[in-house]
Image (tube, grey):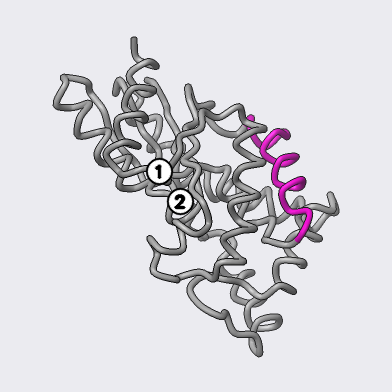
Amino acid sequence: MSLVVLLGTDGAGKSSVATAVVERLRAGGVDANVRWARWQPFLLRPARAVVARLWLENRHFARGREEPAEVSEVKRTVVGGNGLLGRAYLLLACLDYWCQQVPALMFRRRAQVLLLDRYWYDLLIDACGNAPGAEQTAVRLVLGSWRHLFPAPREVLFLDVSPQVAFARKRGENALPYLERRVTIYRAVARALGAERIDADQSLEAVVREALARVNSTVQ
């Protein structure tokens, strides 16, 4: 199985590209599947509810999933500090993700191509928050021992979208400063992973053609 991951912030077009690429692969006779692989908290749901009650009760998200600066700083400090609390959180989160995704990946291992819309990298990026210094923390984590828990992809395709384009595509769901920080973190992680960069500011058709060519190269 050729496991290919699409990496990129909200508004990069991952889902649209993944669907179109798989459709064209199948039309060409390739046994291909796509899987939406975003983390959905389960094991940590009770703890997250307590944290939200204690820390977020009087804080309001400006729009969409934008988080208050103080929450981002707490995330970066706890997760990036190598302390017991941060390690315990990451362990539970990674185990939670493993249970949700890895058995399904193994079930589809006979497919020629499995294209993932997101992967465990996004879990760690979300855990680091958007505070200054989060990109260094995220890079250290994705290159650390956590990677041994998950199947290594054959290829990581980074859909590199500008904050302005992502903002327009999502119709202002997240504020522009939030997206600017997010894009910076994703770019740092993509470089660390050696991901293949695709300019996601292009038209959907152009991005799909480029992604298709790179996916095809993994099965030849």
Residue 81, magenta (yes or no): no
Q: Is residue 19 left or right of residue 67?
A: left
Q: Which comes sooner in the sequence, label 2 or label 1?
A: 2
Rendering coords of residue 1 (x, y %)? 37, 20
Quadrant of the rendering where the C terminus is positioned = top left
Which amino acid type corresponds to the residue marked 1 in the rendered image? Asp
Task: From the viewer's perspective, tell me whether residue 140 is left or right of residue 147.
Answer: right
Q: Nearer the viewer, residue 8 or 201?
A: 201
Let me know if residue 139 is in the magenta part. Answer: yes
Q: From what the image shows, is residue 74 above or below residue 50?
A: above
Q: Amino acid at mark 2?
A: Arg
Asked which secondary structure carries label 2, the reply is loop
Circle 2 is placed at which residue position?
38
Find disc 1 in the rendering and name its residue: 117
**Left or right for 208, reference 189:** left
Residue 213 placed where, x, y %?
33, 22
| Magenta segment | 132-148
The circle drawn on residue 196 is none
